[in-house]
Image (tube, helix red, strand yellow):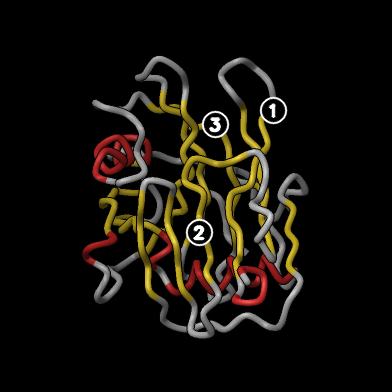
């Protein structure tokens, strides 16, 4: 169970994302983003070592607001071989130095996200300890999903992770209202839109060889 500490972070998560987002091929803006934390959820690391957060940040720097999905992991020490996935480092008021990573490159987040698709774990509230987030829904129809190393690719639409059996996990970095018809599974979540409504969209989908064919 992750314990949520209400304390200071220097720099803040949004400050790290403000620098990092424009380096991504799926960032739709043309300048420095103006970000607001709008929602998301957490997953628990069974070992209790890694913080796992799926944050939705809304960028208001352009002609219209754009919501971005940033799955992040927080570690007390660098993740070996993941320098390319480092979003930045922070000083946590309780836990001390923390290394923040683009979570799709972190094996702990990948394992727990696949468990969420299969219904073997429960999404947790973003800012409350030991509180399930029932707005997060999941579905998957297919064989057991393999864990282990996978190939990560990025394009203008988001991020893909190809699993050892050929299944592709897609992160919709700009969350979409509905899942593609070819999806064998999906995870949906919600956030507060700038107009005051509670927005809901697909955060991630699974595409197996069977569902794609």
Choose the circle earlier in sequence order: 1 or 3. 3
Disc 1 on helix, strand or loop? strand
Answer above or below: position of 167 versus 205.
Answer: below
Q: Residue at x 73, y 67 (%)?
A: 140
The answer to which quarter of the image holds residue 103 is bottom left
Q: Which residue is mark 1?
A: 198
Q: Residues within 10 Å of mark 2 (few under 14, many from 20)?
A: many
SS at circle 2: strand
Residue under label 3, please give it.
Answer: 38
| Number of numbered tags placed on the structure image | 3
Residue 180 rendering spot, x and y as whole percentages: 64, 52
Q: Is residue 134 left or right of residue 117?
A: right
Structural crowding at the residue carrying mark 3, measured as other residues with C-alpha within 10 Å and reported as few (<14), some (14–19) or many (≥20): some
Residue at position x 29%, y 48% in the image:
91
Secondary structure type for disc 3 = strand
| Residue visible at 50% across and 59% down in the picture | 52
- Residue 169 is situated, as x and y percent measured from the top left of the image, at 53, 65
Instruction: List the residue tagged with mark 2.
Output: 52
Residue 15: which numbered mark, if any?
A: none
Number of the front mark, 1 or 2: 1
């Amino acid at each position: 169970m992750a314990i949520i500490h209400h304390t200071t972070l220097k720099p803040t998560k949004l400050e790290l994302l403000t620098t990092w987002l424009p380096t991504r091929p799926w960032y739709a803006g043309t300048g420095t983003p103006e970000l607001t934390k709008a929602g998301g959820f957490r997953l628990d690391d069974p070992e209790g070592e890694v913080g796992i957060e799926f944050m939705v940040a809304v960028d208001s720097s352009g002609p219209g607001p754009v919501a971005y999905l940033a799955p992040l992991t927080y570690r007390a020490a660098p993740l070996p071989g993941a320098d390319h996935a480092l979003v930045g480092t922070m000083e946590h008021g309780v836990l001390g130095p923390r290394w923040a990573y683009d979570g799709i490159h972190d094996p702990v987040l990948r394992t727990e996200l696949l468990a969420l698709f299969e219904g073997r774990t429960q999404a947790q509230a973003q800012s409350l300890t030991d509180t399930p987030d029932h707005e997060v829904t999941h579905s998957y129809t297919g064989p057991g999903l393999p864990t282990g190393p996978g190939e990560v690719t990025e394009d203008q639409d988001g991020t893909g992770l190809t699993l050892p059996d050929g299944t592709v996990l897609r992160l919709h970095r700009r969350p979409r209202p509905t899942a593609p018809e070819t999806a064998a599974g999906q995870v949906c979540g919600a956030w507060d839109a700038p107009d005051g409504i509670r927005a809901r969209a697909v955060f991630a989908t699974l595409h197996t060889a069977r569902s794609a064919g």
